[in-house]
Amino acid sequence: MNGTLSTLAKRARALLPDRADYALMARDPRRDLLAGLTVAVVALPLALGFGVSSGLGAEAGLATAVVAGTLAALFGGSNLQVTGPTGAMTVVLVPIVAKYGPGGVLTVGLMAGVLLIGLALLRAGRAMRFVPAPVVEGFTLGIACVIGLQQVPGALGVPKPDGDKVLVVTWRAVDEFVRTPNWTAAALAAAVAAVMLLGARWRPGVPFSIVGVVGATVVAQACHLTAAPPIGDLPSGLSAPSLGFLDLSVLGSLLAPAVAVAALAALESLLSATVADGMTVGQRHDPDRELFGQGIANIAAPLFGGVPATAAIARTAVNVRTGAGSRLAALTHAAVLAVIVFAASPLVAKIPLAALAGVLVATAIRMIEVGSLRAMLGATRSDAVVLVLTALGTLALDLVYAVVIGLVVAGALALRAVARQTRMDQVDFRPDLPGEHSDEEHVLLAEHIVAYRVDGPLFFAGAHRFLLELTEISDVRVVILRLSRVTTMDATGALVLKDAVQKLDRRGIAVLTSGLRPGQRRTLDSVGALEPLHGREYATTPEAIAGAHAHLVATGVLPAPRQSASAVPVEQPTP
């Protein structure tokens, strides 16, 4: 017990930040400050919208962006992550609000935070390294498409249609635009996106997103463009800390939703961090520390009336693309949002929604790495299938389902590839024959004995193909299986081997093995597969051949060896 507590204490200390984590913040503060300001401008309407969508109001979204964004930046494992309320999390929260009310959502957020810290202490974040690159690339492509499509209503200047699926909402928005076109909003969105995309090619270091948003706002105000509606009035401040939402009587029933929220927060944050690493050179996140930081953020956000938070890939992408290099950018984003809440809400309220939609459309386009996608699609057919299915799942379903689909398909294709590596090749055993044998004996032995070498894993994915090949053997009396090159064997492989031995035995064909390792023997013994071998396991191939020869002699297939005269016993005279 003491050893376990000591281990957890060491892990907890390793998760805490130190001075080196913040050393990068002094390297290029100007770029980080500009990146943080840009992200704040983009994050503001998203925080307001996701707060309203969750059912707790715009104040909840802003509280989450400020509080969770600050703590995740301080304690997280990535220098580039931007944390706040997200669309994927909102989808999970809506049914919780409907069943348990706002207090249920806040309690779930607190419980999810505790679970995330527990995952960090258990080092669960390291499991992210097992996610294949095509899944990450497919997720990035899919989420870029989702981010872009989510902006269609705002970019076209139409009210957001009802619906949960982004494709349905986009179709309805386009249909509404065709009926009543709003060319002013569309022109503003297109202009902001063009300024960002073309400006980034011309002067990568200039924050053209701010230039575009400010320009669009000035034009909209100067020309009194009522067809381009602004964000609107903002709340005047954050909620005071409160513990009144904790209802101990429903904690048991909220455990399952809390697990779902924690799983989504962990998955989305780690995928976002991986994508952010891929968009930069030299940046690598610590997955366990990232879970720890998200846990701290989710424990604190409900205390200020916030909702469960996670790393936001759209805001993280904006952060990276605008030149962020340290945690200072994410901290600046949170600080700017806090200032906006208390001081600058009248000014920001005038920003056209179409302009912000243009920022996110440009961000979505810049998230797509064409060269990386082309390389992944051209690598192997399996990689292409996994990438496309993950992207389509992200677009048509949601993030969790998409990643699960990608992992399942990638795992199935990997098992298929590994299973195909298992080979059973017939080999010439005569060089291993012990002793001196005449040509006639060689011919007789080759006629009645066949030897196979099994290479690769013998497990559930490919064992039945092995059984089919083995049971098709005919016209011999003894089969020698050389198993020294079997890399792994599971219970299914052992059962298949047992079945093959029994089928061949019923046909009068004896099976001998050589080169069995202790681990394989234990697996065979656990399923009763050693019993049909009748002790016909040998350490080396020559011993197995000698055993096969003895079996053929015992069954009368080969004549018994003649005894030499010196071997005949001599009767001793009686004294």
Image (cartoon, rainbow, N blue to C red):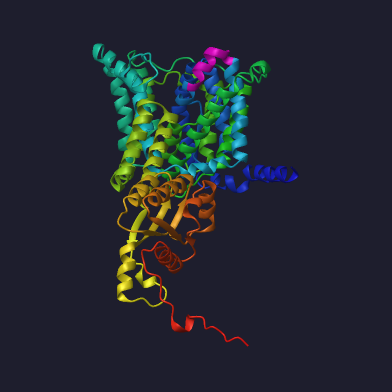
Residue 540 image offset from top left, x and y in percent: 46, 66
Residue 120 lies in what quarter of the image?
top right
Q: Residue furthest front?
A: 574
**Which stretch appears magenta?**
92-102
Q: Residue furthest right?
A: 2
Q: Does the magenta segment cover residue 96?
A: yes
The residue that appears at 31% across and 54% down in the rendered structure is: 474
**On the rendered image, what quadrant is the N terminus found in?**
top right
Q: Against 496, is 552 above or below? A: below
Residue 480 image offset from top left, x and y in percent: 40, 60
Residue 364 image offset from top left, x and y in percent: 36, 32
The one of 559 and 269 positioned closer to us in this rendering:
559
Residue 9 lies in what quarter of the image?
top right
The residue that appears at 68% across and 42% down in the rendered structure is: 8
Residue 350 image offset from top left, x and y in percent: 42, 18
Q: Main secondary structure of the magenta part?
A: helix
Q: Against 226, is 79 above or below? A: below
Q: Against 487, is 1 above or below? A: above
Residue 129 can be seen, yes or no: yes
Q: Does the magenta segment cover residue 154?
A: no
Q: Is residue 51 left or right of residue 132?
A: right
**On the rendered image, what quadrant is the C terminus found in?**
bottom right
